[in-house]
Image (tube, helix red, strand yellow):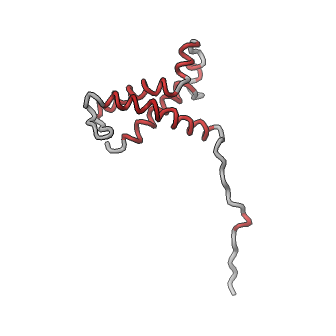
C-alpha cells in the first residue's frame, strides 16, 4: 500500500474522534474518570498509542511507511512518533470543520452573466 502517509493519520484521527468527541460514543467517553478523561482529551498523548495500534494493523497487512517495510521492527515506533504530530493537526482541522469554523464562500447570484443572442 503506497498511501500509508494518508491512511495512518486518518485512522489515528478517526480513533481519537471516536474516543474523545463523537456523539455515537458519548455514552462511553462521558463516563471516563478524571485522569483518563484528561489523557483521552489530548490528541498528542493518545495519538502515540493510536499510531502504535494502527502500525500493528500495518504490521499485519505489511504496509510500508516512509521507506520502511511494514514488518520492520522500527516501523511501529516511527508511526507512533509521527502520530504525536499529525493527530492534533488533523483532529483540529476536523473539529473546526465540524463546528462550522471554516467559512463557506458562495457565489452571489448577481455575478451570473446572461448572454443574449444579437
Q: Quadrant of residue 42?
A: top right
Classify 44 as above or below 118.
above
From the viewer's side, name the closer residue of 9 and 112: 9
The residue depicted at 38 percent of the width and 26 percent of the height is: 52
Q: In this view, does 51 lie to the left or right of 19?
A: left
State the residue at coordinates (56%, 39%): 93
Q: In which quadrant of the rendered image does the N terminus lie?
A: top left
Q: Which of 36 and 77 is in front in this view?
A: 77
Q: Position of residue 6 (x, y in %)?
A: 41, 42
* Residue 19 placement (x, y as % from top left): 52, 24
Whole-percent x and y of residue 28? Answer: 55, 19
Please tell me in which quadrant of the rendered image residue 76 appears: top left
Q: Residue at x 44, y 36 (%)?
A: 9
Which sits in the foreground, 85 or 95? 85
- How many numbered marks, from 0 up? 0
Residue at the extreme bottom of the image, as rendered: 118
Q: In which quarter of the image is the C terminus?
A: bottom right
101 in relation to 104, above or below = above
Q: In this view, does 14 lie to the left or right of 58?
A: right
- The image quadrant that residue 95 belongs to is top right
Residue 35: x percent and y percent? Answer: 55, 13
Amino acid at each position: 500500500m503506497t498511501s500509508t502517509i494518508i491512511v495512518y493519520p486518518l485512522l489515528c484521527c478517526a480513533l481519537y474522534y471516536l474516543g474523545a468527541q463523537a456523539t455515537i460514543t458519548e455514552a462511553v467517553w462521558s463516563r471516563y474518570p478524571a485522569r483518563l478523561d484528561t489523557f483521552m482529551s489530548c490528541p498528542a498523548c493518545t495519538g502515540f498509542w493510536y499510531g502504535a495500534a494502527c502500525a500493528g494493523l500495518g504490521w499485519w497487512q505489511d504496509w510500508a511507511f516512509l521507506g520502511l517495510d511494514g514488518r520492520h521492527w522500527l516501523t511501529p515506533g516511527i508511526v507512533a512518533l509521527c502520530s504525536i504530530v499529525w493527530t492534533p493537526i488533523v483532529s483540529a482541522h476536523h473539529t473546526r470543520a465540524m463546528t462550522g469554523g471554516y467559512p463557506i464562500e458562495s457565489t452571489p447570484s448577481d455575478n451570473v452573466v446572461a448572454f443574449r443572442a444579437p
